[in-house]
Image: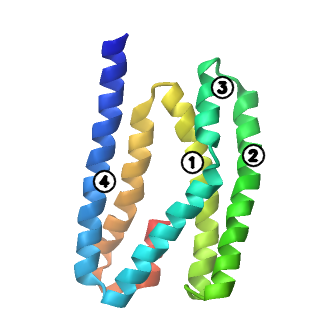
Amino acid sequence: MIKALFLRSSYHFFGLVCIKLFSVLLFLFLARTLPVGEFGTLSFFVTVLSLCTLVADWGLIQWSQLKLQRGVDNEIIQKVSEARVLTVLFSMLLFLGYSLLTHAFPFALNVIFLLTLIPEAFLSVTDSYYLVQKNIQKIIGKQVLKLLVPCMFIVLSPSNLSLTNILLSFM
């Protein structure tokens, strides 16, 4: 049992480390390609998105993992999804308040940001389900796909490397 747990945890850990290394390489490339101001906006955008996703989580992933370990139940997934709607709305309101006060991003980026919060929130619910089901490949695969889209965009259209286009590819 301990050996199986260690193997599963190691697979998950090394998969996430590889994804983070790939992400660092992508951001290093973008730092060398984009003008300084646009790269700063991109970094700030990704940071604010991470913070809003964290607020929208509100501990639901850990709670749902605990409940799902006691038995897979569609009612638990439904309850977490319903709670997730409320926490995402709360997170969206916080971001709207912040963006109205600071005008940190142009209007188009604010809309992109708000639309991005919705799938991010519900994808994390599936992460908790797959962790309990010991199906770590799907979680790692999702993370890889999230990085491959911007990479494919950069490779296929290097002449369109504007901040808005890169942010759209991250969504």
Does 60 appear above or below 90?
above
Q: Earlier in the sequence, mark 1 or mark 4?
A: 4
**Picture coordinates of residue 104, whole percent (x, y):** 55, 85
Residue flagged by tag 4: what amino acid is it? Lys
Sequence-earlier tag: 2 or 3: 3
Kindly report the distance in space between the C-alpha atoms of the residues bearing marks 1 and 4: 18 Å
In this rendering, does residue 166 appear at all? no
| Residue under pointer 4 | 20
**Mark 1 and mark 2: span between their CA atoms?**
14 Å
Residue visible at 76% across and 37% down?
79
Residue 165's x, y, as percent?
A: 44, 79
Q: Residues within 10 Å of mark 4 (few under 14, many from 20)?
A: some
Residue 9: x %, y % from top left: 35, 29
State whether residue 99 is above or below residue 51.
below
Counting residues from the start of the chain, the first of labels 2 and 4 encountered is 4
Q: Which mark is residue 123?
A: 1
Q: Do the residues labelled 3 and 1 touch (CB within 8 Å)?
A: no
Q: Nearer the viewer, mark 3 or mark 1?
A: 3
Q: Which mark sits nearer the N-terminus, 1 or 2?
A: 2
Q: Distance between the residues labelled 3 and 4?
A: 29 Å
Q: Circle 4 sits in a helix, a strand or a loop, which is it?
A: helix
Mark 2 highlights which residue?
A: 83
Give the label on residue 96, or none. Answer: none
Is 102 positioned to the left or the right of 160 in the image? right
Q: Which amino acid does label 3 sit on?
A: Lys
The residue shown at (50%, 61%) is: 50
**Dots 3, 4 in contact, CB < 8 A:** no
Q: Mark 2 belongs to which amino acid? A: Ala
Q: Name the residue under label 3.
A: 67
Residue type (three-letter) at the residue carrying disc 1: Leu
Earlier sequence position, callout 3 versus callout 1: 3
